[in-house]
Amino acid sequence: MNQYRNGQISHWMTQAGDSLPIFPQFRGGLATADLVVVGGGLTGLWTAYYAKKSDSSLNVVVLEAENVGYGASGRNGGWLSALTPGNRKKFASAPGSSRESAVRFQRAMQETVDEVLDICRLEKIDADQHKGGNLTVATTMAGWARLQSRRHTDLQYGLDEGEVQLLSRDLARARINIDGTCGALFYPQVARIDPAKLVHELAAVVAKMGVTVYEHSKVETVEPGRVKTKLGQLSADRVAICTEGYSGPIVGSRKIIPINSSMIVTKPLSDTDWQQIGWNGLECLNDAAHTFIYAQRTDDGRIAIGGRGAPYRYASDVGGAGETPPQTVGLLLGRLRTFFPGITFEADHAWSGVLGVTRDWCASIHYDPWSGISSAMGYAGHGVTATNLAARTLVDLMSETKSELTTLPWVGYDSGKWEPEPIRWLGVHAMYRLFGVADRWEESLGSHKTSLLARVGSRLAGLHE
């Protein structure tokens, strides 16, 4: 039986090993700062970075409850993509917004991919970044119909034909030789990264800039002008809450919930295996199934692949260091074996993490000038790029600078609240069960249309555009 490492945050984090930066615990008693950033993930670190860039004299402090990158920033699939963190149709119809606003949001996400890559070059951050694009493959005719419809919607929201390309079966398989491919979409403006390398090297950069970073310094409460931890408190003119799926205890448990996503990384594949698979462009890969996967070919010749597994833990439990059930590992290995028959895949490491999800799956940014408290959250799995855009927006808002970023439709956006337990648990699990049944229905019948069950689930969740 295949033995694999399970939990321990992620493969990315364990690979970093002794190269991880280590920061002290906050034991300040009473201290002051110009800006306190709550959360040592990508949103928090990018916020610290751009705050210091805008004013090098600022006293900026980052408080992280565990280790830098402990949350989604160190566990994600490693996609630097332009996927909008939310439903563009909902952003377009928000009060004071318009389709033009949603188009500007999509364009900002496209530009942010290059912003991150440019900063990596400027700051000499090596995160195994490679801009190979994203291939979204359909392995059913219903999925192929959805991709064609998605492309039409993408064009309506500001992408041009070169930015979302419709590929035939043969062109798709020439990139990645997935069995049963019907066709694919290709998005060139996507890069693969090692997320732990990105977050840790960014932490090292901000520390050199003069930002004070504390680990194992969990924030208990945020109040106007004050942040409290167990071992002391900080007075600050500005506070930025950047805790994503862990935000519930600070912002309110029904504003955002942690949805679970699980990953595995395979043992390295042989040259013969890679000759069969292809994947020479190092594209990020996902599929058109309702219970979709996301994957990348890693720098050391493995496949890292993720999917939902058990989607939600009762009462918004965040799952600690991410131990993953064997059945979820089996499902992900099974998807690889379906894609690439005849190749032996063995898991080397399995882990889970949580992504922050609002009631309608749309991210939001808020700033209250009276209290000085701001927040960014709800990326719903599209956060590697969105964290950078959110951080730049937060810095403009906190400095009361009017800019193109501060007029984007996620600023001040209200997603409403999640239902209380146990309705919330039942609803999330019912939605994912509908999607799973819909996938099996479409596959077994060879359907050319999306299952009614999936359409119902999508509308209930607010995912339909």
Image: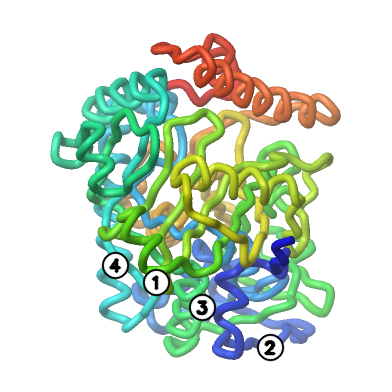
Disc with the residue nearer the chain's start (1 vs 2):
2
Image depth: mark 3 or mark 2 in front: 3
Q: Earlier in the sequence, mark 1 or mark 3?
A: 3
Give the CA distance from mark 3 to mark 4: 15 Å
The secondary structure type at the circle numbered 4 is helix
Q: CA distance from mark 2 to mark 4?
A: 29 Å
Q: Which mark is residue 200?
A: 3
Residue carrying label 2? 24
Residue at image point 37% right, 22% down: 146
**Type of amino acid under label 3:** His
**Eye-nearest disc, 1 or 3:** 1
Amino acid under disc 2: Pro
| Rendering coords of residue 305 (x, y %) | 52, 53
Crowd tier of the residue under label 2, counting other residues whose Cα lies within 10 Å: few below 14, some 14–19, many 20 or above? few
Q: Amino acid at mark 4?
A: Leu
Kindly identify which numbered label has been placed on residue 8.
Answer: none
Task: Tell me the quadrant of the picture where the C terminus can be found.
Answer: top left
